[in-house]
Image (spheres, rainbow, N blue to C red):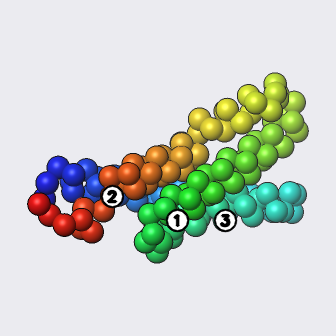
């Protein structure tokens, strides 16, 4: 296997690790979350990250996979930020919406979600070495 092939495999492993972490975080989010308040946002907060690993496993088109990871990450950031805002507003320590979104963006699960986009996009740019004729 050449350097390009090893790089592509490494990127795909990184996508798998990031998406698995995000999916496990989505499962963990179900525990202890009050779905009676802000039901739609709470369901999106758990469902979007849960789908991440399944996108990695079952979507084989690289452009579609990267697009779905972007949709998941954007929706997850929005839902997570809304729930963070709900919490900090109830406790009275919110400073601004931007600060809340940035604080949410710096969490490990959201960073892993955006990492899946980054690594998937990089693997897309490299291209699948198995589909190219070897020289």
Q: What residue is rendered at 27% in x and 68% in y? A: 131
- Comes first in the chain, label 2 or label 3: 3
> Seen in the image, is 51 located left or right of residue 89?
left
- Under circle 3, the secondary element is helix
Extreme-top residue of the structure: 95
Q: What residue is rendered at 30% in x and 62% in y? A: 128
User: According to the image, label 3 marks what residue?
Assistant: 47
- Under circle 1, the secondary element is helix
Mark on residue 84?
none
User: According to the image, label 1 marks what residue?
Assistant: 64
Q: What residue is rendered at 81% in x and 25% in y? A: 95
Mark on residue 127?
2
Viewer-side residue, 21 vs 71: 71
Which quarter of the figure has residue 57? Answer: bottom left
> Seen in the image, is 60 located left or right of residue 31?
left
Whether residue 53 can be seen here: no
CB atoms at circles 2 and 1 under 8 Å apart? Answer: no
Label 3, residues with CA under 10 Å away: few <14, some 14-19, many ≥20 = some
- Under circle 2, the secondary element is loop
Q: Quadrant of the N terminus?
A: bottom left
Label 2, residues with CA under 10 Å away: few <14, some 14-19, many ≥20 = some
Q: Position of residue 14 (x, y in %)?
A: 37, 52
Whether residue 36 can be seen here: yes
Viewer-side residue, 31 vs 76: 76
- Comes first in the chain, label 1 or label 3: 3
Closer to us: mark 1 or mark 3? 1
Viewer-side residue, 129 vs 113: 129
Q: Quadrant of the C terminus?
A: bottom left
- Comes first in the chain, label 2 or label 1: 1
Q: How far apart, in angstroms, are the residues tagged by discs 2 and 3? A: 30 Å
């Amino acid at each position: 296997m050449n350097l390009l092939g090893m790089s592509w495999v490494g990127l795909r492993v990184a996508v798998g690790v990031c998406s698995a972490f995000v999916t496990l975080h989505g499962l963990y989010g179900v525990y202890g979350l009050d779905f009676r308040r802000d039901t739609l946002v709470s369901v999106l907060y758990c469902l979007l990250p849960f789908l991440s690993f399944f996108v990695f496993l079952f979507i084989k088109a690289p452009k579609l996979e990267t697009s779905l990871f972007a949709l998941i990450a954007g929706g997850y950031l929005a839902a997570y930020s809304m729930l963070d805002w709900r919490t900090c507003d109830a406790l009275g320590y919110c400073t601004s919406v931007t600060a809340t979104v940035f604080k949410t963006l710096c969490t490990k699960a959201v960073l892993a979600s955006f990492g899946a986009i980054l690594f998937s996009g990089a693997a897309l740019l490299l291209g699948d070495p198995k589909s190219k004729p070897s020289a």
